[in-house]
Amino acid sequence: MTTRLAALTILALAGCPSTSGDWVPDDIDEQQTLDRLGQAGYQKLCSAFDDFVHDQYRSNYLIRAVCTAHALQTTDNAVMCGEAVDACLDTLPAPVEAQLEQILAQADCSAVDAMVTGCSSPVSKLTGCLDELGTKIDQIEFSLTCAAFGSPVPQDWWKVSLPPSCSALGESC
């Protein structure tokens, strides 16, 4: 019975959403300060997060949202919108690719504006901030559908606000 419970626990944990530990390089200690991490470590951490963002957040749902926004702006009715979304998913037009990159760029170390030198905040504050930015990207994945046809698409539908944890980190460093 105990073995069965342990197996169920392992299976349950395997289904849990990913955490910053999944993308943080093994040789970076999240408890050390950003100052101690140094510029090279900071760049390594930021590069790892950028790779993670492009692998994880460039999901079919996010691509569909960008294709839907493009279709809502370039078609005349909901049926045409749906067809345009399908065509877009087959081959991304340049404007859709550019907007997708703008969305992903929001979940980046440069959005935080933290100075590494002299910063006594732990690396975990930065990884937590970046994880929150990723969560905000997740939220826009489901923001548009062709059912919204006839309603204007706000020009800033894809923008995310900087989480308070990121603002605080930027101010303290």
Image: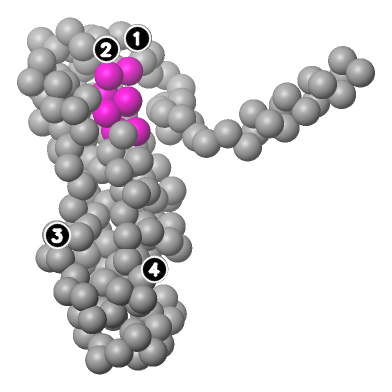
- Picture disc at residue 156: 3
Q: Is residue 102 above or below residue 93?
A: above
Q: Amino acid at mark 1?
A: Gln
Q: Which residue is mark 2?
A: 122
Rendered residue at 32%/26% (across/down): 127
Rendered residue at 32%/25% (across/down): 128
Q: Nearer the viewer, mark 3 or mark 2?
A: 3
User: What is the x, y in percent for residue 92?
Assistant: 34, 76
Which numbered disc, 4 or 1, marks the residue that appears first in the sequence?
Answer: 1
Q: Nearer the viewer, residue 53 or 152?
A: 152
Which numbered disc, 3 or 2, marks the residue that appears first in the sequence?
Answer: 2
Q: Which residue is mark 4?
A: 64
The Cα–Cα distance between marks 3 and 1, rounded to whole angstroms, is 36 Å
Where is residue 147, by image quadrant? bottom left
Q: Is residue 23 above or below residue 66?
A: above
Residue range highlighted in magenta: 124-131
Which numbered disc, 3 or 1, marks the residue that appears first in the sequence?
Answer: 1
Q: Which residue is mark 1?
A: 31
Which numbered disc, 2 or 1, marks the residue that appears first in the sequence?
Answer: 1
Of helix, strand and loop, which one carries label 4? helix
Q: Residues within 10 Å of mark 1 (few under 14, many from 20)?
A: few
Of helix, strand and loop, which one carries label 2? loop
Q: Nearer the viewer, mark 2 or mark 4?
A: 4
